[in-house]
């Protein structure tokens, strides 16, 4: 969590996450992340190898963050679910191009 926070001090960033790998994370660690992660740290999140439960939790975290933000601060975190790492990398390239304004 500290790494996410420190990186975000420089600028928001994109996150790719293999949710199958998160299956080994214990419940206390998952709870801590859901309570302490901040959507303003991220430009977008791409999650792959997800189950329905992962999708519901991720959407819930983003929704909770949106409820706590200032009305003057528009939501900026995109979240997308894809099947594979390869699809996640393709989508990341598209998002980076959009963020760069197509400058490549």
Image (spheres, rainbow, N blue to C red):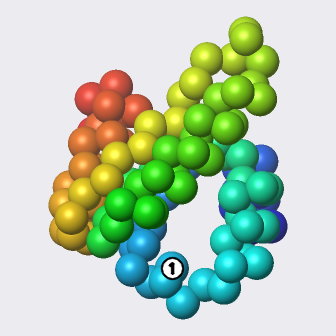
Residue 73 falls left or right of residue 77: right
- Measured from the top left, where is residue 41 in percent x and y? 67, 45
* 55 up-or-down from 51: above or below: above
Residue 42 visible to the viewer? no
Q: Residue furthest bottom?
A: 24
Is the N terminus in the top left, top right, bottom left or bottom right quadrant? bottom right
Residue 79: image quadrant is: top left
- Measured from the top left, where is residue 49 in percent x and y? 30, 71
Taking the spot 35% from the left edge, 47% from the top edge, the residue there is 80
* 79 up-or-down from 48: above or below: above
Taking the spot 78% from the left edge, 18% from the top edge, the residue there is 70
Front residue of this view, candidates 68 and 43: 68
Provide the residue designation for mark 1: 22
- Measured from the top left, where is residue 16 in percent x and y? 42, 62
Taking the spot 32% from the left edge, 31% from the top edge, the residue there is 98
Total marks in image: 1
């Amino acid at each position: 969590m500290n790494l996410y926070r420190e990186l975000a001090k420089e600028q928001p960033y994109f996150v790719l996450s293999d949710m199958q790998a998160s299956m080994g994370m214990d419940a206390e660690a998952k709870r801590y992340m859901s309570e302490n992660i901040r959507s303003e740290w991220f430009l977008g999140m791409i999650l792959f190898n997800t189950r329905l439960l992962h999708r519901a939790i991720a959407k819930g975290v983003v929704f909770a963050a949106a409820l706590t933000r200032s009305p003057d601060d528009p939501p900026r975190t995109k979240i997308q679910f894809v099947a594979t790492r390869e699809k996640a990398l393709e989508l990341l390239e598209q998002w980076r191009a959009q963020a760069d304004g197509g400058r490549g």
